[in-house]
Structures are given as C-alpha cells and as structure tokens.
Amino acid sequence: MKPSPTVGLLAMQGAFKKHGEIINSLGNKTLEVRKPEQLEQIDGIIIPGGESTTIYKMLQKSGLFDTLKDKIENGLPVLGTCAGIILLAQRISNSDQPRLGVLNVTVERNSYGRQTESFETELEIKGLDNTPVTGIFIRAPKIKETGHGVEILSEFAGSPVLVKQDNIVAATFHPELTNDKRIHKLFTDIL
Ligand code: GLN
C-alpha cells in the first residue's frame, strides 16, 4: 500500500458520497471522478450502487468508459457494489446492456422478487473475524455463476454476495449503508 493512497469515487450517479466517508475514515484520500484524466490521479476506484444502465451511459458520455476498462484490466483496484457489480460483470443473464465486462461472473439484475426488493441480513465473511456483517440489499442482483479466478467471500441463500478476483472486489449489497468499515478495509488492503 502507498503511504496515503487516493481512492476515486465514480461520481456519475448513485451513493458515492457514503463510500467516500468510510474511505476517509480509514485514512485514505478520495477524489470524485467525472473525467478521464482524473483516472491518472487515483490508486483505486469505487463503482457505487445506483442504476447500472444510467451509470453506463454517463461513463460513455464522459469519455471514461474505455480508459476505466483498460485500467481495471491492467490491475487498478476496484470495489463495485450492487449496480457496480452489474457493470463489472462479464455476463448478465437477463439483459444485453453494455458493461465493463471484467469480472468473471454471471449476474441477474433485480433478482429478488417484489416482496424482498429490499432487505437486510447478517452475512458471514470469509477471512474476517466471526462477527457477521449486515448486508443491505436494494433491488439487488444475484450472482448466478462464478468462473475461473473468482473467490467467493460470502454467500446468502445459496448465492455468492461478495466475491474477489485479483484486483476486483464486488458485492451485491451496500456496505456503505452501515457503520461497519470491514468490507471497505478488504478493498483498501489491496491498494
Ligand atoms: N437494480 C439496479 C440495477 O439493475 C441496482 C440497484 C442498486 O444498485 N441498488 O442497476
């Protein structure tokens, strides 16, 4: 880890500010990223929840898409949450929307039924102490399949909800909506 790394917050749409508060409280700097040249100033990036199709459109419009994809493929650490994991996924089972396609998983968008569109549950996380993490799921995707190179760090009801592949950490839930910093720490540990 660099002495004081800067974490980019992809600031197109969605809940990026809360991620920033946690990252700052862990002793790292943050930068709201809206332009391609800002990718040169960061040591890692967070792709927040929101609406994956909207975030994609804004990535294209801002000119960030190609450089961001290239940087992630070349090792830029990234934390993607909820819509973020949809953008990172190589395959989306129920949509042909464009995406970064860098994480070897298949996701299904809006995969929990109407009754459970939003819910909270306690998650055991591999590699953390025994205290569970509260997972807040909001119109969350499900990871239907993981491919080679993907480590499953947590599961809920038979589906992975937190995965890691080299420089990519991705969750289907919203770790920024609790006061627990441990998921962000898993990410800052790879900066
Ligand atoms: N349902 C959203 C999507 O498909 C994701 C929801 C979220 O990020 N909370 O993009």
Image (cartoon, rainbow, N blue to C red):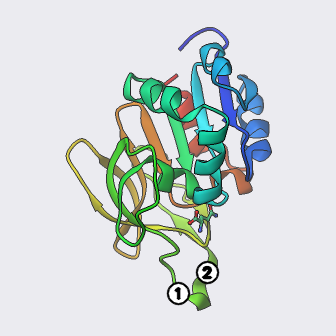
Q: Dot 1, how many residues are within 10 Å of its Cα: few (below 14), some (14-19), or many (20+)?
A: few
Secondary structure under tag 1 reads: loop
Left or right, 148 with reference to 27: left
Q: Work out which residue is located at the far top of the displayed protein and give it.
A: 3
Task: Indicate if the residue with disc 1 has its beta carbon within 8 Å of ligand 1.
Answer: no
Image coordinates for residue 166, horizontal then vertical, percent = 35, 32
Image coordinates for residue 78, horizontal then vertical, percent = 51, 34
x 49%, y 31%: residue = 66
Image coordinates for residue 161, horizontal then vertical, percent = 44, 61
Q: Which label was assigned to residue 22?
A: none
Discs 1, 2 touching: Cβ within 8 Å: yes
Q: Work out which residue is located at the far left of the displayed protein and give it.
A: 148
Classify the position of ligand 1 by quadrant: top left, top right, bottom left or bottom right: bottom right
Instruction: Give 187 or 76, whichever is nearer the viewer.
Output: 76
Type of amino acid at the residue the image marks with label 2: Glu
| Up/down of 140 relative to 74, above or below | below
x 49%, y 50%: residue = 87
x 66%, y 28%: residue = 8
Type of amino acid at the residue the image marks with label 1: Gly
Image coordinates for residue 45, horizontal then vertical, percent = 59, 31
- Distance CA(mark 1)–CA(mark 2): 6 Å
x 63%, y 77%: residue = 119
| Up/down of 73 relative to 151, above or below | above
Q: Dot 2, how many residues are within 10 Å of its Cα: few (below 14), some (14-19), or many (20+)?
A: few
Query: Quadrant of the rendered structure where residue 62 is?
Result: top right
| Up/down of 59 relative to 135, above or below | above
Secondary structure under tag 2 reads: loop
User: According to the image, label 1 marks what residue?
Assistant: 113
Left or right, 178 with reference to 66: right
Q: Work out which residue is located at the far bottom of the displayed protein and give it.
A: 115
User: According to the image, label 2 marks what residue?
Assistant: 117
